[in-house]
Amino acid sequence: MPAYKLTYFNARGRAEPIRLLFAAAGIKYEDVRIEGADWPALKPKTPMGHLPILEVDGTTLCESTTIARFVAKRAGMVGKDDLEEAKADMIVDGVKEVFRKLLTMFFEKDESKKEELKKDVFENTLPECLRSFGKLANPSGYFVGDSLSWADVEFYNLMEMVRPSFPGDLLKDNANLSKVIANVGGNPAIAKWIKERPESAF
Amino acid sequence: MAQKYRLTYFNLRARAEPTRLVFAAAGVEYEDVRIQRDKWPDLKPNTPMGQLPVLEVGGVTLCQSMAIARYVAKETGLAGKTKLEEAQADMLVDGIDDLRGRQAVIRKASEDRKEECKKELADFAPDFLSKYENLCGPHGHLVGDSLTWADLVFYDVMSKVLVVLPGALDGFPKLAKVMDTVTANEGVATWLAKRPDTPH
Protein backbone atom coordinates (compact mmCIF):
# COMPACT_ATOMS: atom_id res chain seq x y z
CA MET A 1 0.00 0.00 0.00
CA PRO A 2 1.67 3.26 -1.10
CA ALA A 3 2.40 5.76 1.65
CA TYR A 4 1.13 8.61 -0.51
CA LYS A 5 -2.41 9.25 -1.74
CA LEU A 6 -2.85 12.15 -4.14
CA THR A 7 -6.40 13.26 -4.90
CA TYR A 8 -7.35 15.59 -7.73
CA PHE A 9 -9.75 15.76 -10.66
CA ASN A 10 -9.08 13.77 -13.79
CA ALA A 11 -6.83 16.48 -15.18
CA ARG A 12 -3.21 17.55 -15.30
CA GLY A 13 -4.01 21.03 -13.96
CA ARG A 14 -2.50 21.79 -10.57
CA ALA A 15 -1.54 18.19 -9.84
CA GLU A 16 0.69 17.42 -12.79
CA PRO A 17 3.96 18.79 -11.37
CA ILE A 18 3.41 16.53 -8.35
CA ARG A 19 2.82 13.50 -10.58
CA LEU A 20 5.91 14.35 -12.65
CA LEU A 21 7.97 14.50 -9.46
CA PHE A 22 6.67 11.18 -8.17
CA ALA A 23 7.59 9.70 -11.56
CA ALA A 24 11.07 11.24 -11.63
CA ALA A 25 11.77 10.02 -8.12
CA GLY A 26 10.35 6.56 -8.74
CA ILE A 27 8.09 6.92 -5.70
CA LYS A 28 4.88 4.89 -5.76
CA TYR A 29 1.66 6.71 -4.94
CA GLU A 30 -2.09 6.36 -5.32
CA ASP A 31 -3.16 8.71 -8.14
CA VAL A 32 -6.82 9.27 -7.27
CA ARG A 33 -8.89 11.17 -9.86
CA ILE A 34 -12.40 12.10 -8.81
CA GLU A 35 -15.43 12.95 -10.92
CA GLY A 36 -16.78 16.48 -10.75
CA ALA A 37 -20.04 15.10 -9.34
CA ASP A 38 -18.18 13.62 -6.35
CA TRP A 39 -16.48 16.88 -5.43
CA PRO A 40 -19.23 18.55 -3.32
CA ALA A 41 -19.23 15.61 -0.90
CA LEU A 42 -15.43 15.58 -0.59
CA LYS A 43 -14.89 19.36 -0.38
CA PRO A 44 -15.76 19.86 3.33
CA LYS A 45 -13.40 17.03 4.24
CA THR A 46 -10.40 18.80 2.70
CA PRO A 47 -8.24 21.17 4.76
CA MET A 48 -9.13 24.30 2.78
CA GLY A 49 -11.89 23.22 0.41
CA HIS A 50 -9.78 22.70 -2.68
CA LEU A 51 -7.71 20.10 -4.55
CA PRO A 52 -5.15 18.67 -4.91
CA ILE A 53 -4.60 17.11 -1.50
CA LEU A 54 -1.93 14.64 -0.43
CA GLU A 55 -2.56 12.18 2.38
CA VAL A 56 0.71 11.10 3.96
CA ASP A 57 1.88 9.94 7.39
CA GLY A 58 -1.59 10.29 8.85
CA THR A 59 -2.03 13.90 7.81
CA THR A 60 -3.53 15.72 4.82
CA LEU A 61 -1.64 18.44 2.98
CA CYS A 62 -3.17 20.87 0.52
CA GLU A 63 -1.84 23.63 -1.79
CA SER A 64 -0.25 22.20 -4.92
CA THR A 65 3.08 24.03 -4.51
CA THR A 66 3.43 22.89 -0.90
CA ILE A 67 2.71 19.30 -1.91
CA ALA A 68 5.17 19.47 -4.81
CA ARG A 69 7.88 20.89 -2.55
CA PHE A 70 7.24 18.17 0.06
CA VAL A 71 7.46 15.38 -2.53
CA ALA A 72 10.56 16.99 -4.05
CA LYS A 73 12.20 17.06 -0.60
CA ARG A 74 11.45 13.38 -0.09
CA ALA A 75 12.89 12.76 -3.58
CA GLY A 76 16.04 14.80 -2.94
CA MET A 77 15.10 17.18 -5.74
CA VAL A 78 15.04 20.52 -3.94
CA GLY A 79 18.69 21.54 -3.93
CA LYS A 80 21.53 20.70 -1.57
CA ASP A 81 21.28 23.49 1.01
CA ASP A 82 18.95 26.26 2.19
CA LEU A 83 20.20 28.72 -0.43
CA GLU A 84 19.69 26.29 -3.32
CA GLU A 85 16.26 25.42 -1.92
CA ALA A 86 15.44 29.14 -1.89
CA LYS A 87 16.55 29.49 -5.52
CA ALA A 88 14.25 26.63 -6.47
CA ASP A 89 11.41 28.22 -4.48
CA MET A 90 11.81 31.55 -6.23
CA ILE A 91 11.75 29.93 -9.69
CA VAL A 92 8.58 28.05 -8.78
CA ASP A 93 6.98 31.23 -7.44
CA GLY A 94 7.86 32.94 -10.73
CA VAL A 95 6.29 30.03 -12.62
CA LYS A 96 3.15 30.39 -10.47
CA GLU A 97 2.83 34.06 -11.40
CA VAL A 98 2.77 33.19 -15.10
CA PHE A 99 0.41 30.28 -14.41
CA ARG A 100 -2.02 32.66 -12.67
CA LYS A 101 -2.00 35.01 -15.65
CA LEU A 102 -2.66 32.05 -17.95
CA LEU A 103 -5.59 30.96 -15.82
CA THR A 104 -7.08 34.47 -15.82
CA MET A 105 -6.77 34.43 -19.59
CA PHE A 106 -8.29 30.92 -19.94
CA PHE A 107 -11.28 31.73 -17.76
CA GLU A 108 -12.09 35.16 -19.22
CA LYS A 109 -15.51 34.91 -20.80
CA ASP A 110 -15.58 38.26 -22.59
CA GLU A 111 -13.99 37.51 -25.96
CA SER A 112 -12.44 40.92 -26.56
CA LYS A 113 -11.04 41.07 -23.01
CA LYS A 114 -9.69 37.56 -23.51
CA GLU A 115 -7.88 38.67 -26.67
CA GLU A 116 -6.39 41.62 -24.75
CA LEU A 117 -5.17 39.31 -21.98
CA LYS A 118 -3.75 36.88 -24.51
CA LYS A 119 -1.88 39.71 -26.22
CA ASP A 120 -0.47 40.85 -22.86
CA VAL A 121 0.70 37.34 -22.01
CA PHE A 122 2.31 36.88 -25.42
CA GLU A 123 3.92 40.30 -25.72
CA ASN A 124 4.83 41.00 -22.09
CA THR A 125 4.44 38.21 -19.55
CA LEU A 126 6.05 35.37 -21.48
CA PRO A 127 9.01 37.24 -23.00
CA GLU A 128 9.87 38.86 -19.65
CA CYS A 129 9.59 35.56 -17.83
CA LEU A 130 11.69 33.68 -20.37
CA ARG A 131 14.31 36.44 -20.40
CA SER A 132 14.68 36.36 -16.58
CA PHE A 133 14.50 32.60 -16.34
CA GLY A 134 17.04 32.17 -19.12
CA LYS A 135 19.57 33.99 -16.94
CA LEU A 136 18.61 31.99 -13.85
CA ALA A 137 19.07 28.60 -15.50
CA ASN A 138 22.64 27.44 -16.05
CA PRO A 139 24.09 26.36 -19.43
CA SER A 140 23.69 22.69 -18.42
CA GLY A 141 19.94 23.27 -18.26
CA TYR A 142 19.34 23.28 -14.51
CA PHE A 143 17.92 26.05 -12.35
CA VAL A 144 19.62 24.74 -9.24
CA GLY A 145 22.96 22.98 -8.98
CA ASP A 146 23.78 20.48 -11.66
CA SER A 147 20.97 17.99 -11.43
CA LEU A 148 17.22 17.85 -11.95
CA SER A 149 15.21 19.73 -9.33
CA TRP A 150 11.54 20.46 -8.93
CA ALA A 151 12.17 23.97 -10.32
CA ASP A 152 13.08 22.42 -13.67
CA VAL A 153 10.00 20.18 -13.56
CA GLU A 154 7.65 23.07 -12.70
CA PHE A 155 9.07 25.14 -15.57
CA TYR A 156 8.66 22.20 -17.96
CA ASN A 157 5.04 21.80 -16.86
CA LEU A 158 4.39 25.51 -17.38
CA MET A 159 5.69 25.36 -20.95
CA GLU A 160 3.42 22.34 -21.58
CA MET A 161 0.47 24.45 -20.47
CA VAL A 162 1.53 27.46 -22.50
CA ARG A 163 2.02 25.59 -25.76
CA PRO A 164 -1.64 25.03 -26.82
CA SER A 165 -2.36 28.77 -26.63
CA PHE A 166 1.02 29.89 -27.92
CA PRO A 167 2.38 27.38 -30.39
CA GLY A 168 5.74 27.99 -31.97
CA ASP A 169 9.19 27.69 -30.50
CA LEU A 170 9.15 30.26 -27.71
CA LEU A 171 12.57 29.03 -26.59
CA LYS A 172 14.38 29.18 -29.93
CA ASP A 173 16.78 31.89 -28.81
CA ASN A 174 17.02 30.64 -25.25
CA ALA A 175 19.71 27.97 -25.02
CA ASN A 176 19.59 27.51 -21.25
CA LEU A 177 15.83 27.06 -21.08
CA SER A 178 15.80 24.78 -24.12
CA LYS A 179 18.23 22.58 -22.21
CA VAL A 180 15.99 22.61 -19.11
CA ILE A 181 13.12 21.32 -21.26
CA ALA A 182 15.39 18.68 -22.82
CA ASN A 183 16.64 17.56 -19.39
CA VAL A 184 13.14 17.15 -17.99
CA GLY A 185 11.55 15.67 -21.10
CA GLY A 186 14.54 13.38 -21.62
CA ASN A 187 14.42 11.98 -18.10
CA PRO A 188 13.42 8.34 -18.77
CA ALA A 189 10.97 8.06 -15.88
CA ILE A 190 9.27 11.34 -16.79
CA ALA A 191 9.16 10.43 -20.48
CA LYS A 192 7.54 7.10 -19.54
CA TRP A 193 4.92 8.84 -17.38
CA ILE A 194 4.09 11.36 -20.09
CA LYS A 195 3.59 8.53 -22.57
CA GLU A 196 1.41 6.46 -20.22
CA ARG A 197 -0.53 9.06 -18.23
CA PRO A 198 -4.32 9.23 -18.63
CA GLU A 199 -5.54 11.55 -21.36
CA SER A 200 -7.31 14.65 -20.15
CA ALA A 201 -8.47 17.88 -21.72
CA PHE A 202 -6.18 20.06 -19.58
CA MET B 1 31.22 45.18 8.76
CA ALA B 2 28.64 44.32 6.12
CA GLN B 3 25.60 42.37 7.27
CA LYS B 4 25.22 38.77 6.17
CA TYR B 5 21.69 39.51 4.93
CA ARG B 6 20.65 42.54 2.86
CA LEU B 7 16.92 42.95 2.22
CA THR B 8 15.87 45.57 -0.33
CA TYR B 9 12.31 46.83 -0.77
CA PHE B 10 10.37 50.07 -0.96
CA ASN B 11 9.65 51.98 2.24
CA LEU B 12 6.57 49.85 2.92
CA ARG B 13 5.53 46.83 4.93
CA ALA B 14 3.60 45.02 2.18
CA ARG B 15 5.58 42.14 0.67
CA ALA B 16 8.74 42.57 2.76
CA GLU B 17 7.12 42.63 6.17
CA PRO B 18 6.80 38.85 6.64
CA THR B 19 10.58 38.54 6.22
CA ARG B 20 11.21 41.48 8.55
CA LEU B 21 8.99 39.80 11.17
CA VAL B 22 10.96 36.56 10.87
CA PHE B 23 14.27 38.39 11.37
CA ALA B 24 12.74 40.24 14.33
CA ALA B 25 11.30 37.15 16.00
CA ALA B 26 14.59 35.32 15.59
CA GLY B 27 16.63 38.29 16.82
CA VAL B 28 18.81 38.13 13.72
CA GLU B 29 20.31 41.33 12.32
CA TYR B 30 20.04 42.31 8.69
CA GLU B 31 20.34 45.37 6.48
CA ASP B 32 16.81 46.72 5.97
CA VAL B 33 17.26 48.74 2.76
CA ARG B 34 14.29 50.87 1.70
CA ILE B 35 14.57 52.55 -1.67
CA GLN B 36 12.77 55.58 -3.02
CA ARG B 37 10.45 54.98 -5.96
CA ASP B 38 12.56 57.10 -8.31
CA LYS B 39 15.53 54.75 -7.77
CA TRP B 40 13.54 51.72 -8.86
CA PRO B 41 13.85 51.97 -12.68
CA ASP B 42 17.65 51.82 -12.41
CA LEU B 43 17.61 48.91 -9.98
CA LYS B 44 14.91 46.85 -11.70
CA PRO B 45 17.03 45.31 -14.49
CA ASN B 46 19.56 44.21 -11.87
CA THR B 47 17.02 42.08 -10.02
CA PRO B 48 16.39 38.42 -10.89
CA MET B 49 12.78 38.90 -12.01
CA GLY B 50 12.34 42.68 -12.17
CA GLN B 51 10.60 42.82 -8.78
CA LEU B 52 11.17 43.59 -5.12
CA PRO B 53 11.80 42.47 -2.45
CA VAL B 54 15.19 40.89 -3.02
CA LEU B 55 17.50 39.37 -0.44
CA GLU B 56 21.26 39.34 -1.00
CA VAL B 57 23.10 36.62 0.89
CA GLY B 58 26.27 34.65 0.23
CA GLY B 59 26.81 36.29 -3.14
CA VAL B 60 23.36 35.23 -4.31
CA THR B 61 20.30 37.43 -4.91
CA LEU B 62 16.95 35.85 -4.07
CA CYS B 63 13.58 37.24 -5.12
CA GLN B 64 9.93 36.28 -4.51
CA SER B 65 8.78 37.39 -1.07
CA MET B 66 7.65 33.99 0.18
CA ALA B 67 10.79 32.21 -1.06
CA ILE B 68 12.80 34.80 0.87
CA ALA B 69 10.68 34.53 4.01
CA ARG B 70 10.85 30.73 3.95
CA TYR B 71 14.64 30.83 3.50
CA VAL B 72 15.11 33.22 6.42
CA ALA B 73 12.75 31.08 8.50
CA LYS B 74 14.85 27.99 7.77
CA GLU B 75 18.08 29.82 8.55
CA THR B 76 16.68 31.01 11.88
CA GLY B 77 14.95 27.78 12.94
CA LEU B 78 11.43 29.10 12.41
CA ALA B 79 10.35 26.87 9.51
CA GLY B 80 9.04 23.87 11.47
CA LYS B 81 10.74 20.98 13.27
CA THR B 82 10.13 18.19 10.74
CA LYS B 83 9.58 17.99 6.98
CA LEU B 84 5.90 17.46 7.66
CA GLU B 85 5.70 20.54 9.91
CA GLU B 86 7.53 22.52 7.23
CA ALA B 87 4.89 21.42 4.73
CA GLN B 88 2.07 22.30 7.12
CA ALA B 89 3.58 25.77 7.59
CA ASP B 90 3.99 26.10 3.81
CA MET B 91 0.37 25.23 3.10
CA LEU B 92 -0.96 27.64 5.71
CA VAL B 93 1.22 30.41 4.26
CA ASP B 94 0.06 29.58 0.71
CA GLY B 95 -3.57 29.50 1.76
CA ILE B 96 -3.56 32.83 3.56
CA ASP B 97 -2.95 34.57 0.26
CA ASP B 98 -6.66 34.29 -0.55
CA LEU B 99 -7.45 36.38 2.52
CA ARG B 100 -4.56 38.78 1.91
CA GLY B 101 -5.68 39.44 -1.65
CA ARG B 102 -9.23 40.33 -0.63
CA GLN B 103 -7.93 42.76 1.98
CA ALA B 104 -5.30 44.33 -0.30
CA VAL B 105 -7.82 45.02 -3.03
CA ILE B 106 -9.73 47.41 -0.74
CA ARG B 107 -6.86 49.87 -0.62
CA LYS B 108 -6.44 49.85 -4.40
CA ALA B 109 -10.17 50.06 -5.16
CA SER B 110 -11.76 53.25 -6.46
CA GLU B 111 -13.86 55.10 -3.89
CA ASP B 112 -17.14 53.79 -5.29
CA ARG B 113 -15.88 50.20 -5.16
CA LYS B 114 -14.40 50.26 -1.65
CA GLU B 115 -17.59 49.37 0.22
CA GLU B 116 -18.25 46.49 -2.15
CA CYS B 117 -14.71 45.14 -1.60
CA LYS B 118 -15.11 45.42 2.18
CA LYS B 119 -18.35 43.45 1.94
CA GLU B 120 -16.62 40.77 -0.15
CA LEU B 121 -13.97 40.45 2.55
CA ALA B 122 -16.63 40.31 5.26
CA ASP B 123 -18.46 37.55 3.37
CA PHE B 124 -15.29 35.57 2.70
CA ALA B 125 -13.51 35.78 6.05
CA PRO B 126 -15.71 33.71 8.42
CA ASP B 127 -15.70 30.52 6.35
CA PHE B 128 -12.02 30.90 5.55
CA LEU B 129 -11.04 31.53 9.17
CA SER B 130 -13.11 28.60 10.40
CA LYS B 131 -10.96 26.32 8.21
CA TYR B 132 -7.83 27.86 9.69
CA GLU B 133 -9.24 27.49 13.22
CA ASN B 134 -9.71 23.78 12.45
CA LEU B 135 -6.15 23.42 11.18
CA CYS B 136 -4.61 25.51 13.96
CA GLY B 137 -2.85 23.79 16.85
CA PRO B 138 -3.95 24.38 20.47
CA HIS B 139 -0.65 25.84 21.70
CA GLY B 140 -0.96 29.35 20.29
CA HIS B 141 0.84 28.25 17.15
CA LEU B 142 -0.61 27.30 13.79
CA VAL B 143 1.86 24.43 13.47
CA GLY B 144 3.51 22.41 16.21
CA ASP B 145 4.24 23.84 19.61
CA SER B 146 6.65 26.63 18.84
CA LEU B 147 6.79 29.75 16.68
CA THR B 148 7.01 29.29 12.94
CA TRP B 149 6.91 31.77 10.09
CA ALA B 150 3.33 30.64 9.45
CA ASP B 151 2.33 32.38 12.70
CA LEU B 152 4.13 35.55 11.61
CA VAL B 153 2.61 35.60 8.12
CA PHE B 154 -0.82 34.95 9.62
CA TYR B 155 -0.28 37.81 12.06
CA ASP B 156 0.81 40.15 9.25
CA VAL B 157 -2.27 39.46 7.12
CA MET B 158 -4.74 39.20 9.99
CA SER B 159 -3.69 42.47 11.62
CA LYS B 160 -4.66 44.25 8.40
CA VAL B 161 -7.95 42.34 8.13
CA LEU B 162 -8.82 43.26 11.73
CA VAL B 163 -8.59 46.95 10.81
CA VAL B 164 -11.45 46.44 8.36
CA LEU B 165 -13.27 43.70 10.35
CA PRO B 166 -12.50 44.19 14.06
CA GLY B 167 -14.54 41.19 15.15
CA ALA B 168 -13.14 38.79 12.56
CA LEU B 169 -11.50 36.50 15.14
CA ASP B 170 -14.53 36.31 17.47
CA GLY B 171 -15.38 32.65 17.76
CA PHE B 172 -11.90 31.57 16.69
CA PRO B 173 -10.02 31.29 20.00
CA LYS B 174 -7.05 29.28 18.69
CA LEU B 175 -6.35 31.86 15.98
CA ALA B 176 -6.76 34.70 18.49
CA LYS B 177 -4.22 32.91 20.69
CA VAL B 178 -1.77 32.85 17.75
CA MET B 179 -2.09 36.63 17.44
CA ASP B 180 -1.34 37.00 21.17
CA THR B 181 1.63 34.63 21.01
CA VAL B 182 3.14 36.58 18.12
CA THR B 183 2.76 40.01 19.73
CA ALA B 184 4.14 38.65 23.00
CA ASN B 185 7.34 37.55 21.27
CA GLU B 186 10.02 39.94 22.50
CA GLY B 187 11.69 40.43 19.13
CA VAL B 188 8.38 41.03 17.37
CA ALA B 189 7.14 43.43 20.07
CA THR B 190 10.34 45.48 19.81
CA TRP B 191 10.09 45.59 16.02
CA LEU B 192 6.41 46.59 16.03
CA ALA B 193 7.22 49.47 18.34
CA LYS B 194 10.13 50.79 16.31
CA ARG B 195 9.38 49.92 12.67
CA PRO B 196 8.93 52.87 10.31
CA ASP B 197 5.38 54.07 9.96
CA THR B 198 4.30 53.49 6.35
CA PRO B 199 0.98 53.75 4.49
CA HIS B 200 0.80 49.95 4.05
Image (cartoon, coloured by chain):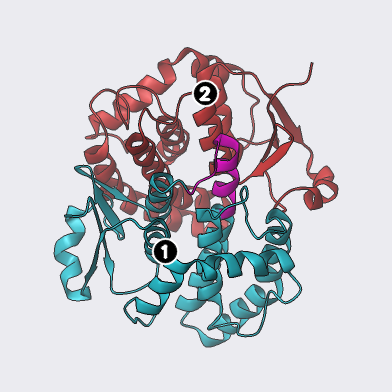
Chain colours: A cyan, B red
In reply to whether residue A82 is colored magenta, the answer given is: yes
Which numbered dot is residue A20? 1
Give the left or right position of residue A179, taking residue A36 as reference: right
Same chain for the residues under marks 1 and 2 in the image:
no
Looking at the picture, tell me which residue is in the foreground, B120 or B111.
Answer: B120
Q: Amino acid at mark 1?
A: Leu
Residue for badge 2? B76
Q: Would you place residue B145 above or below residue A35 in this image?
A: above
Residue B32 to residue A110: above or below? above
Local secondary structure at mark 2: loop
Indicate the position of residue B79 as horizontal and vertical percent values.
44, 31
In the picture provided, is B72 more to the left or to the right than B159? right
The part of the chain drawn in magenta is A77-91
Q: Report if residue B188 is visible in the image.
A: yes
For mark 2, name the chain: B
Q: CA distance from mark 1 to mark 2?
A: 32 Å
- Of labels 1 and 2, the one closer to you: 1
- In the depicted structure, whether residue B137 falls above or below residue B10: above
